[in-house]
Amino acid sequence: MTGKVWFVGAGPGDPDLITVKGRDLIARAGAILYAGSLVSEAALRWAPPACEPADSKGMTLEEIADWLIDQARRHETVVRLQTGDPTLYGALIEMARPLDAAGVPWAVVPGVSSALAAAAAAGESLTLPELTQTVILTRVAGRTPMPEGESLEALARHGCTLCIFLSITLLHRVQAELRAAGWPEDAPILVVQKASWPGEERIVRGTLADIKARCQAERIGSQAMIIASPALGARQREAVARSKLYDPAFGHRFRRATLLEEQS
Ligand code: SAH
């Protein structure tokens, strides 16, 4: 008999932000492997006493895959707990391939990504009517090069919301690429460190011109999400259009337009 490996999104940090499905899988797991430095150990508070959670910090991808395969031969439910959502910058495919080769079934349980937790922390909307209706999740090139056509400069030319992962130590490069794409010096930029972590979350607001200096002053150098968007700060700007969904003159499937109703 072979058990199943579940890649579970632990959420961005607040242990309450794991899904009910993820929590239930942890509660019946025979073995749990978590990404030590990133996943709050509090997420393990639901693990059964017989299960000894292991930290993958210091393991190579091969060692992780071997561990998961070995545990799946002994337990019905094996959980690989990952930060945020497992499908974003989570090495999912590299871990899943050896499982396929070994005939071990696996599945993914989505999680709340840090991009969404950062927007929530700051009370910002990533989309706003007539300003931007598109969100790009990306990073700048570090040791991992960006594929053709995906430089931040090229993506920033769309002028839409950019959620930039894994790049807080490369803020100078983020600034340079946004400038090259034509973003103005006063474009608002938001940085959230440890979004949703109880007592540890920090929010820095700035502009393209000063965001790096502000982050340096606050000593923010890791675990941070950078959001650049024309929608930032819109609640302070009265002129920003409101959503058509709640516009009294706009009917949709669930609510006929008041104006039409008045006419009929
Ligand atoms: N799968 C994760 C991302 C992993 S890559 C997700 O969906 O969120 C790691 C990067 O995610 C970090 O460099 C940082 O940019 C971001 N990150 C992860 N947790 C974060 C948090 N709580 N607050 C802000 N950024 C976070």
Image (cartoon, helix red, strand yellow):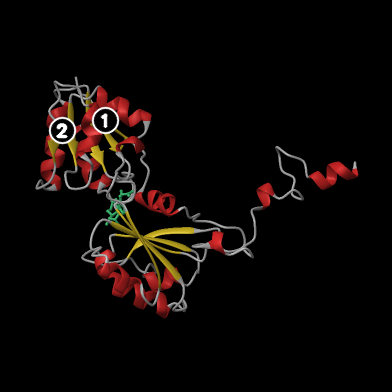
Q: Of residues 5 and 160, which is closer to you in this image? A: 160
Contact check, label 2 and label 1, Cβ < 8 Å: no
Q: Residues within 10 Å of mark 1 (few under 14, many from 20)?
A: some
Q: Position of residue 97 (x, y in %)?
A: 23, 42
Name the residue type under label 1: Pro
Q: Position of residue 67 (x, y in %)?
A: 12, 35
Number of numbered discs: 2
Point 23% across, 65% down: residue? 219
Up the image or down, 106 lies above or below 249; here it is above
Q: Quadrant of residue 192?
A: bottom left
Whether residue 132 appears in this view of the structure is no
The quadrant the N terminus occupies is top left
Whether residue 224 appears in this view of the structure is yes
Circle number at residue 192: none
**Residue beneath disc 1:** 105
Q: Quadrant of residue 108?
A: top left
Q: Residues within 10 Å of mark 2 (few under 14, many from 20)?
A: many
Up the image or down, 151 lies above or below 253; here it is below
Badge 1 element: loop
**Residue beneath disc 2:** 69
Ranked by sequence position, the earlier of labels 2 and 1 is: 2
Q: Position of residue 252 (x, y in %)?
A: 71, 43
Name the residue type under label 2: Ile
Badge 2 element: helix
